[in-house]
Image (cartoon, grey):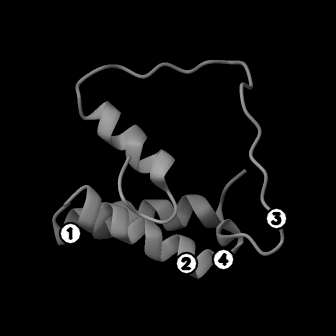
Amino acid sequence: MPLIRTGQDYGLWLKLLKTGKNAYKFNQVLTQYRILPNSISRNKIKKAKRQWQIYREIEKLPLLTSIECFCFYAYRAVFRK
């Protein structure tokens, strides 16, 4: 797992997918995700900073690729169904 305060699970998934193995959708809920009123996950600014940190520091993506990925992330965050 990457050494970051939040988003370790996401960072781990990215690392696992880089191994070349395939990931498959599983149509059954195996876990529950709980967000408390004062949790880190509720702060959208901190969440966005963490996402940028993953792109640049963990994944070491080039600046333009990071911008492209971040724009997609922001779009999905705003227009999530």
Please tell me how crowded label 3 is: few (under 14), some (14-19), or many (20+) other residues with Cα within 10 Å: few
Say which label, 3 or 2, has the lower sequence index.
Answer: 3
Mark 1 sits on what residue? 64
Mark 1 residue type: Leu
Q: Nearer the viewer, residue 18 or 34?
A: 34
Q: List the single residue furthest toward the right.
A: 37
Disc 3 to disc 1, how far (Cα)? 34 Å
Mark 4 sits on what residue? 43
Disc 2 to disc 1, how far (Cα)? 21 Å
Q: Which mark is residue 36?
A: 3
Q: Please give the name of the residue rendered at 31% of the width and 40% of the height, measured from the top-left corner.
A: 15
* Label 1 residue SS: helix
Would you place residue 39 above or below residue 14 in this image?
below
Mark toward the viewer: 4 or 1:
4
Mark 4 residue type: Asn
Q: Please give the name of the residue rendered at 44% of the width and 65% of the height, measured from the top-left corner.
A: 51
Disc 3 to disc 2, how far (Cα)? 15 Å
